Image: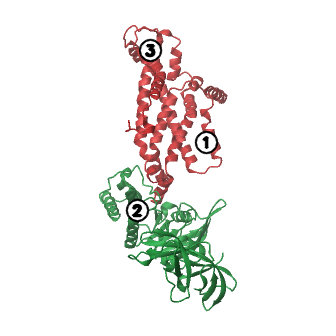
Amino acid sequence: MSDVSYIKRPNRPLHVYALSYLAFLYIPVLFLPLFSFNDSIYISFPLKGFTTNWYASMASDEPMHAALINSLKVGAVASVIATLLGILGAKAVTRYKIFGQRTVVSTIMLPLVIPGIVMGVALLILLSRIGINLSLVTITLGHILICVPFSMATLMARFEGLDSSMEEAAADLGDNAWWVFWRVTFPMVFPGILASLLLCFTISFDEFIMAFFLSGTDPTLPIYIYSQLRFPQKLPGVLALGACILVVSFFVVFFSQWLQRQGEFGAAGKGDHA
Amino acid sequence: MNGNDNYIVIDKVAKHFGPVRAVDEVDISVRAGEFFSLLGASGCGKTTLLRMLAGFEAPTSGEIYIDQVATAGVPPHRRPTNMVFQNYAIFPHLNVRRNIAYGLREERLAKDETRRRVDEALELVKLPGLGDRSANELSGGQRQRVALARALIKRPKVLLLDEPLGALDKKLREEMQLELRALQQSLGITFVFVTHDQEEAMTLSDRIAIMSQGKVLQIDTPSKIYNSPVNIEVADFIGQMNFIDAEVLDNKSGRITVNTAGLGKVTVPGKGNAARQGDSSIVAVRPERLFLSAKAPEKKANCVQGTIKTTAYLGDRSHFYVDVEGREKPVAVAAQEAGGNEAQSFELGSKVWISWQDESLLHFARD
């Protein structure tokens, strides 16, 4: 027992706690793929038999495909624009002295704590007053609004971790502000930019409330799923779809974590001579 | 006015951060090819001054000329200066070769010409063959060399160094000091070096500017600064010094006679010193300029008896702290180690004689 230090010694009760915590988190989610292979339209035990019919039926579900494509479009545009705004905002508040800096940051972060339903109603009223028709564009606008704080938070951490002497060194070696950004700042915060894109995309992809208020005739995937819940016979198909989203999310998260690790050089070299 | 003697001219430069006067009306002229150090405690304004030379800060007032060109409004990337940063600022996303070649973008060199220049720079800083290393695989000393190569490849008129040796351990630091000095001499580039380490400044510099609270106290060669400090602050900052309260008795033909608290009546060389009879002043003397002996010196002048209070053994020399009458603080006396000499045999509490020469004493007016 002497080969582990006091602080690192194993602790059985904590292991049990950790395992039950994981079970509590993930067992409900695992029912999704389980019932998606069940040969019955009713979600109940005992399981009837194995089938891939629900997955097969997805292939021919045209409205679902349309909703999926809508969601991908909205997610792509919203994440790119939110991340661009996030880069500019994060660079501004971490690199320059701005009058009322704290207020600016709090204002940008505010959508995090405003309930989605309030934001949704507010935007709906505003848009209808101005006379803009509800469409994918309005959903995208709403999603940008809620994604920017997440993008800012991700990128501010990255910009703060970027030693300003790196940018000074680049300027000292002959680069103007434009080149400094592209040759030093951008590559060094790039993992943060990717993380922000993935995070914003995920948020937009599964966002329901704003989309519910702001969608016109084209639903996004969450709206479509919600609309299908009214029809019991459609439920197993929704489960199959949910299972697919689960698997894709898993890979996206895995990929973004891997990217973050690849990008850890951005912070390296700071610690060894503090 | 000679261009070579005034290669860098810092003319009444001040930098205020809000109410703080980080740099307060500083005048410095640096000669071409000189190794010039800015020495002072942290917060004395030396780094701010260096950053103004690099163009990262703009002076609140005053003007800086480099090779007779005014630098006001010239951004860092248009200045003939390059900097070695305190933390080296090696770009972590580039390998060593790309780090060193970073500043060559504007020269639009052919690939093999860039390669040749980088290899040359690597050779110069004694890192041949390390070009393909990633920045994260470098040790502290290697990072320092890469930072140096990256700055020197630009062939700057002035190389600015911001405590570049501070992060290295003692052995490596001493090695790098010698290399840096040799490099500077062989390249003939003007170096402006910021440090808080007086030994480092003494070892490396042709001249040193001592800074304190935004002001320059003295600009001189290391030996002048050590042996003839202009005021008590410089005398106190550089090396060890005994300060003894004194009262002026007489001042004529360049010699001041003072009555001291501890050393008795002494005569101090004081050409041009305005001390007048009755002035309260301070006499200063370096520990190594005092001599210890067990027996009274033959001449009765310039000596005083005391008791050994503490000793400190420092390897190459020993410091003895001697209590003398009329003075609360013991007088520090340094004795060089010279193969079983007498100095070693002074025991605590033993009676000793301290003696000195007039020329070893410095006289300062009280602030």
The chain to which mark 3 is attached is A
Residue B5: percent from the left, percent from the top?
49, 78
Gap between marks 1 and 2 measured at Cα: 39 Å
Reply above or below: A96 against B332: above
Reply above or below: B341 against B64: below
- The residue tagged 3 is A237
Marks 1 and 3 belong to one chain: yes
Residue B180: percent from the left, percent from the top?
40, 67
Is the N terminus of chain A in the top left, top right, bottom left or bottom right quadrant? Answer: top left
Gap between marks 2 and 3 measured at Cα: 65 Å
- The residue tagged 2 is B148
At horizontal 49% and vertical 66% (from top left) the residue drawn is B197
Q: Tell me the colour chain B is drawn in.
A: green
Q: For this rendering, which residue is in front, B131 or A46?
A: A46
Q: For this rendering, which residue is in front, B39 or A212?
A: B39
The chain to which mark 2 is attached is B
Q: Report the amino acid beneath label 2.
A: Leu
At horizontal 43% and vertical 67% (from top left) the residue drawn is B156
Residue B8 visible in image: no
Q: Say which element carries label 2.
A: helix
Marks 1 and 2 belong to one chain: no
- Where residue A125 sits, quadrant-wise, is top right
Which mark, by number, is residue B352?
none
Which mark, by number, is residue A105?
1
Q: Residues within 10 Å of mark 3 (few under 14, many from 20)?
A: many
Residue B244: percent from the left, percent from the top?
61, 77
Q: Tell me the colour chain A is drawn in.
A: red
Badge 1 or badge 3: first in the primary sequence: 1
